Image (spheres, rainbow, N blue to C red):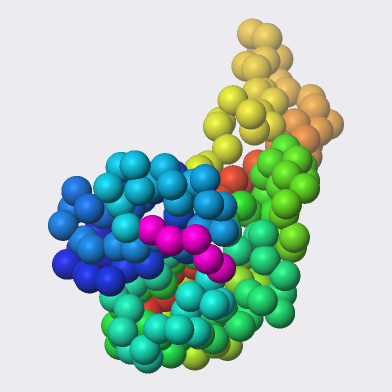
């Protein structure tokens, strides 16, 4: 929906072209860029528009204000900081006014995402805290930028509250037990807020 009605949308790190195909089905013209030639060939086999190349080189060759949208899914964590900031700077100049920029990545602020996903991939270069990527996008000139969180950790994988069972008939809860249950549950809430939140997030901005 963010790209509804857009033309000349670019998918950086397009891979096998899943998003390119969805955009085509929605009537949105899109072009993919990927450093992996094999992935680009798969796109071509499905009749998708794609080419081999890197983000900065491609964007630098585009006219200013010419792109109708830019998206990168699970890409920015593979980039060195200097390269990322250059890419964002170019994105600002190459996107048309009002065109969307979408950067989706793993959420290293979620400990599960960091330890179970991020560090498993040796091609990851730099973990980007949501606030950090949000700031970098704004610093590149995008005045309107928000963070949207994706893929919540399943409730079954989160720390559960300790239930306070009803007291025996004619008895009252021991105040020490009540306080202990409250403390344990409070600690569970704090850990859930750090360890078990959202696996991914996206920074969405418009020029």
Percent coordinates x, y for residue 29 in the rendering: 23, 63
Q: Is residue 51 magenta?
A: yes
Percent coordinates x, y for residue 127 in the rendering: 72, 60
Q: Is residue 162 above or below residue 103?
A: above
Q: Residue at x 63, y 54 (%)?
A: 107
Percent coordinates x, y for residue 203 in the rendering: 49, 67
Q: Nearer the viewer, residue 131 or 118?
A: 118
Percent coordinates x, y for residue 70 in the rendering: 40, 70
- For the C terminus, give its image quadrant: bottom left
Which quadrant of the structure image shows residue 76?
bottom right
What span is colored magenta in the figure? 50-54
Q: Is residue 89 above or below residue 58?
A: below
Q: Residue at x 29, y 75 (%)?
A: 68
Is residue 129 visible from the viewing direction of this image? Answer: no
Q: Is residue 142 magenta?
A: no
Along the horizontal axis of the image, is 39 left or right of 105? left
Q: Nearer the viewer, residue 154 or 30?
A: 30
Q: Is residue 159 above or below residue 196?
A: above
The main secondary structure of the magenta stretch is: strand
Along the horizontal axis of the image, is 119 left or right of 57? right
Q: Residue at x 75, y 31 (%)?
A: 181
- For the N terminus, give its image quadrant: bottom left
């Amino acid at each position: 929906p963010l790209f509804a009605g857009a033309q000349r949308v670019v998918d950086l790190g397009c891979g096998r072209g899943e998003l390119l195909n969805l955009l085509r089905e929605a009537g949105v013209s899109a072009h993919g860029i990927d450093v992996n030639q094999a992935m680009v060939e798969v796109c071509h086999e499905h009749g998708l528009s794609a080419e081999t190349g890197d983000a900065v080189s491609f964007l630098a060759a585009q006219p200013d204000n010419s792109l109708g949208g830019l998206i990168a899914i699970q890409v920015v964590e593979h980039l060195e900081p200097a390269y990322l900031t250059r890419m964002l700077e170019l994105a600002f100049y190459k996107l048309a006014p009002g065109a969307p920029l979408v950067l989706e990545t793993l959420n290293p602020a979620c400990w599960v995402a960091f330890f179970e996903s991020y560090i498993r991939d040796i091609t990851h270069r730099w973990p980007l805290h949501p606030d950090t990527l949000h700031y970098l996008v704004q610093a590149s000139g995008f005045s309107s930028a928000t963070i949207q969180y994706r893929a919540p950790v399943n409730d079954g994988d989160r720390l559960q509250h300790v239930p306070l069972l009803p007291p025996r008939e004619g008895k009252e809860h021991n105040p020490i037990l009540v306080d202990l249950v409250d403390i344990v549950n409070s600690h569970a809430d704090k850990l859930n807020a750090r360890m078990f939140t959202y696996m991914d997030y996206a920074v969405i901005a418009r020029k």
